Image: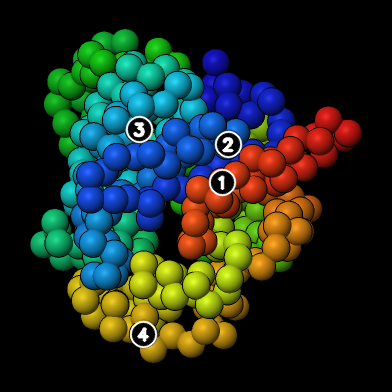
Amino acid sequence: MPTSELQVSENRFKISADASFLMDDNYSLESVKMYENAGFDSVWFADHFLPWQHSFKYSPSVWPLLGVAAERSRSIPIGIDVTSPIGGRYHPAIIAQATATLSLMFPGRIYLGVGTGEALNDGRFMTEWPDWKERMDRLIEGISLIRKLWESPDYFDFQGKYFNMRKIFLYAKPKINVPIYFSAIGEKAAIYAGRYGDHLLTDNSPKKCRDKIFPKFEEGAKKANKDPSRMERAVLVLGGVGNPKQIIAKLRKLIIGGEFLENIDALDPREIDRHAQEVSDEMILNTCYVSETISELIELFDQYKSSGANHIIYTDFSSDPFATAKLFSEKIIPHFRRSLNNA
């Protein structure tokens, strides 16, 4: 069964959580159980070698993290948003093997998000940091190799521009197809996401999603003879609910420097940290979704739903994430479940 059919047959609006910023000194992953008990559709973790900012001191290897998260929960899917099989930190064959192994251990619960990478994380592992076009070409070729390793019934040779392997075969194949979420921030990337991914992963505003990103994604999907209606359009949303000053302070400490970098190929989290202190409160409010009430957050999600999004992955920077998860469980998730039932 094709991945897209497997994953979108429910045809509903999904609400998931990114738990990347809820680490503690013991990497206890209590957030996974919290989100599962609250009724979220999935939990996601970023893949970084270094954190965006020095003031966020946690940057574990995501691969053991995914396995532990799946083991400590019951049935909630676990995703990675995103890894970069472009030949820097990771050869695509290693990503294929690691993901397939997790999928065998936790069938139907592992989602793979992929992207072109960042110099901060991947550039250190390459002699020269390629431009965007080469990284995109590497990503597309890497996805092709990953899928062939998952699907090929026999040994094969792979000859590409960037990856060449002779007499290879993956013994640990996923029994249930693993969906590949293709990260795309711009319009060109969105076309590639439609052509080569199973689903889209972006972080744009509702208006830009509606007017630019989603149409390009659908254009790419149709070029590949896919049905866009059976593909997810997932959006990463950074925000928080509650006291705006507390949320802004948390955003500035953990991630906001990376959001405002003029040079996206910056290499030093300490420098990015210093940059974050120069970002004004107003700039943060115009970039992230700081909500004082649950009603404001529901309105935002409704805007995304109206734009064509069918999956929100929410990264919470509230002062009390457990309280926010409770609000999602009692207010937000039931609201969208009722909307589905009444549709």
Three-letter amino acid code of the residue under disc 2: Ala
Residue 159 in the image: state x and y as whole percent.
23, 35
Q: Pick whichever of labels 3 and 2 is earlier in the sequence.
A: 2
Residue 183 in the image: state x and y as whole percent.
46, 51
Q: Residue at x 24, y 70 (%)?
A: 54
Which residue is the site of mark 3?
A: 69
Residue 277 numbered tag: 4
Which residue is the site of mark 2?
A: 38
Which residue is the site of mark 1?
A: 325
Q: Is residue 340 left or right of residue 200?
A: right
Observer-nearest of 294 and 173? 294
Q: Secondary structure at mark 3?
A: helix
Q: Is residue 129 left or right of residue 173?
A: left
Q: Residue at x 38, y 45 (%)?
A: 45
Whole-number angstrom distance, CA of label 3 to CA of label 4: 33 Å
Three-letter amino acid code of the residue under disc 4: Gln
Three-letter amino acid code of the residue under disc 1: Ala
Whole-number angstrom distance, CA of label 3 to CA of label 2: 16 Å
